[in-house]
Amino acid sequence: MELTEWIRTYDLSSGRRIFALTKTRREAEVLGQPPLVQHIDEALVHDRQTRDLDMRWTGQRVGILSAPVVAPLDARVDHVIAALRAVAEAQARGAAPNAPIHKEVKDFLAAALPAGVYAVTSLPHVEQVAAVERIVAALQGPLAGKVTELNLQRQVDMLSELLPEYRTAVQNAAAGRIEFSSVREARTRGQRYLVEIIARILGTFYRSDDPAHAAARKALLGPIAEQTEAVRAILRARRTPRDVDPVTGDPLPEPPDDEPTAPEPPTDAPAA
């Protein structure tokens, strides 16, 4: 029979587990419980790995790839696109209000960046590669004459040189995508570690009529109960539980709307 059938608690996020178990570990050291400390250390190693997996999964779902080579290339591409607009607009700066250059710049930007710079630079990486490919094709094709007139050749050259490297980096990062089944498995194992630790504490300090045992249970289980109660309150308010910073315990930003969440346990589930 599984421990989870005997000890029922709300699923905690990796950040909440790390925050709680770090506190429990300190109490276990004070109480002189090396086996419990070792068990908690094992759980913390797993949950830190789970947290990294969670963050990669969240980034992947919103189109942000975690490969370290992608971010700097993405930033350079964004800067060049912004410079393309800035240099084009600079050509008209100081010109008379009725000078033809104003319309030329406006028409050029409408063709090269019809929705503006941010509409391109804010795209998920894969979509941004496709958008940059279209921009470069236009700048080197039908807009090539305007590129020369507006002195934009430097920016066009930089963008065309960056594009193959950026495309390759994004493709390589996308090839290393993770499946949600791996994330779910890691989360489940982290919760099992938590239940095992609760069971170990209850099995060590089990006497109901011994004040020392009661005090030890309160010290060791208190941090876990605190996070469990927080999740219980959030679920009863019909909101999605937010993860917390594993060091400070402060709530992190709201998860995406389609983030898979665990179902609420029965109302008679114990706090820990």
Image: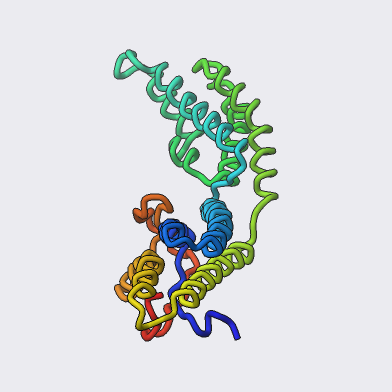
Q: Is residue 265 left or right of residue 66?
A: left
In the foreground, 145 or 30: 30
In the foreground, 217 or 21: 217
Q: Position of residue 126 (x, y in %)?
A: 60, 46
From what the image shows, is residue 71 above or below residue 21?
above
Q: For the point 65% across and 25% down, which residue is it?
A: 161
In the foreground, 189 or 32: 32
Rendered-image quadrant of the N terminus: bottom right
Q: For the point 63% across and 33% down, which residue is it?
A: 137
From what the image shows, is residue 117 above or below residue 241?
above
Q: Is residue 84 visible?
A: yes
Q: Position of residue 254 (x, y in %)?
A: 38, 58
Q: Position of residue 70 (x, y in %)?
A: 60, 38
Q: Position of residue 216 (x, y in %)?
A: 38, 69
Q: For the point 50% across and 77% down, which residue is it?
A: 203
Q: Is residue 231 visible?
A: no
Q: Is residue 116 left or right of residue 136?
A: left
Give the image quarter of residue 182: bottom right
